[in-house]
Image: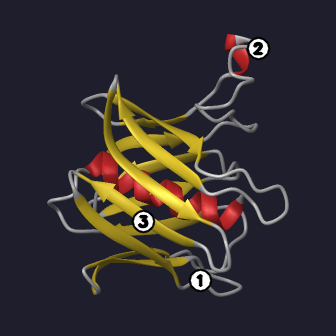
Amino acid sequence: MIIAESGFSKFKYFLSDINRSSIGILKLPTYFAAPRNSPTNDAAPYCLQDFVKIQLPEREYTVEYELLSNRAVRGNDLKFLLIDGEKILASANVYILKKIRWEIDVNNQRYNLVKRSNCFKMRFDIFQNGQKIGHIHDVTGFTFWKQTFEIDLPSEILSAVQVFVFFLCINATFR
């Protein structure tokens, strides 16, 4: 289990294990990143090309995204990628049309992310083959300046991938 905490800023999440020992940081960019398959990528200065970063003791990972569709009215379908150097560790397709759904692919294993949030708490469940295998939810008490989240996914899923799934939840809830 991983615990993620944010302070006043919602752009940095401190990651720890169940014993509250630090294991890394999740950093979100403060402005919109351009998709990988965007024609404007070459025109944007390098200093404006910021990515989501997952910093763990063993290495640093980045999260990038691509457009899967181009719908002006209803929103675009997206593909998020967890990248380790040049290797893609995991991907997530986000389908917007009608009802938003998330399909996560890790080493040819398919997972579905289901939003269970209400007005006050963030809660997502993760399913594989129709069976619930874990959850990510807000365990914060009553406070506005600090949030704490519990990432409870199976241990066979790499910690970088668990943080990637947490990013998907944060992105879906707060952006």
Towards the viewer: 59 or 104: 104
For marks 1 and 2 on the same chain, the one whose residue lies earlier in the sequence: 2
Towards the viewer: 38 or 58: 38
Residue at which label 3 appears: 103
SS state under label 3? strand
* 84 relative to 70, above or below: above
**CA–CA distance in space, label 1 to label 3:** 18 Å
Please identify the residue farthest to the front as the structure is shown. Answer: 70
Q: Residue at x 42, y 58 (%)?
A: 165
Q: Where is residue 105 in the image (x, y as percent from the top left)?
A: 32, 57
* 118 relative to 122, above or below: below
Disc number lying in front (1 or 2): 2
Q: State whether residue 121 appears in this view.
A: yes
Mark 1 residue crowding within 10 angstroms, few (<14) / some (14–19) / many (20+): some
Quarter-of-image position of residue 3: bottom left
* Numbered tag placed on residue 43 in the rendering: 2
* Numbered tag placed on residue 84 in the rendering: none
Q: Position of residue 69 (x, y in %)?
A: 65, 52
For marks 1 and 3 on the same chain, the one whose residue lies earlier in the sequence: 3
Residue at which label 1 appears: 117
Mark 3 residue crowding within 10 angstroms, few (<14) / some (14–19) / many (20+): some
Quarter-of-image position of residue 126: bottom left
Amino acid tagged 3: Glu
Q: Which colouring convention does the figure follow?
A: secondary structure
Q: Which residue is drawn at 66% across and 36% down?
A: 29
